[in-house]
Image (tube, grey):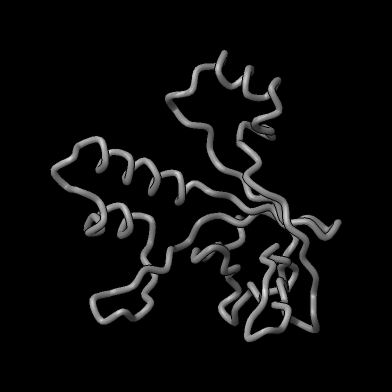
């Protein structure tokens, strides 16, 4: 499989009532119940949760042949052109093709599998943890930050 190219949101992994991992499409995710840690009586909290969900389903990955994966996020609709310009000039954000660069990670092929450097450092049972994780599954999705992405047409 050639992973180079743009990848768009397909689904997000959430836990059901039995704590099993299930994947929800964008539509299902937007319609799913508000989590218990969000006070449903607090309109601002609910609005923020929905804003975050809409942002999540708008994330785009770009796998480049230089060994980098770029994560792009939409610019907030509430941001004015002046605010965006000021944030760019201050070095707070980088914008490419109208989207904010959310992160850049290294990737490599190991046999037929795509692996990504998660950047996570630390130890597990006293041994250094390997920051590299397999991100492509047998269904030809990229699994990244609990989301599945499918290759754009």
Residue 23 spot, x, y in % from top left: 39, 70
Res. 25 image quadrant: bottom left
In the rendered image, the vertical position of residue 148 relative to residue 112, given as above or below: above
Identify which residue, 28 or 118, lies in the foreground.
Answer: 118
Residue at (44% x, 63% y) in the render: 11
In the rendered image, the vertical position of residue 89 relative to residue 125, given as above or below: above
Res. 50 image quadrant: top left
On screen, residue 22 versus residue 100, left or right, reads left
Placement of the N terminus among the 4 image quadrants: bottom right
On screen, residue 17 versus residue 69, left or right, reads left
Residue at (22% x, 59% y) in the render: 36
Residue 6 spot, x, y in % from top left: 66, 53
In the rendered image, the vertical position of residue 148 relative to residue 73, given as above or below: below
Residue at (80% x, 80% y) in the render: 110
Q: Residue furthest front?
A: 126
Residue 64 spot, x, y in % from top left: 78, 55
In the rendered image, the vertical position of residue 134 relative to residue 2, given as above or below: below
Q: Residue furthest top?
A: 82
On screen, residue 147 versus residue 38, left or right, reads right
Residue at (53% x, 32% y) in the render: 75
């Amino acid at each position: 499989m050639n992973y180079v190219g743009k990848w768009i949101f397909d689904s997000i992994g959430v836990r059901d009532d039995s704590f099993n991992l299930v994947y929800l499409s964008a539509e299902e995710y937007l319609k799913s119940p508000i989590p218990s840690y969000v006070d449903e009586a607090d309109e601002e909290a609910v609005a923020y949760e929905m804003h975050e969900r809409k942002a999540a389903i708008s994330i785009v990955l770009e796998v480049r042949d230089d060994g980098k994966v770029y994560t792009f996020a939409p610019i907030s609709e509430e941001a004015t052109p002046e605010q965006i310009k000021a944030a760019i000039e201050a070095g707070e954000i980088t914008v490419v093709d109208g989207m904010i660069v959310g992160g850049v990670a290294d990737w490599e092929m190991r046999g037929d599998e795509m692996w990504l450097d998660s950047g996570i450092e630390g130890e597990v049972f006293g041994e250094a943890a390997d920051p590299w994780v397999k991100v492509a599954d047998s269904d030809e999705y990229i699994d990244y930050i609990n989301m599945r992405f499918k290759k754009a047409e």
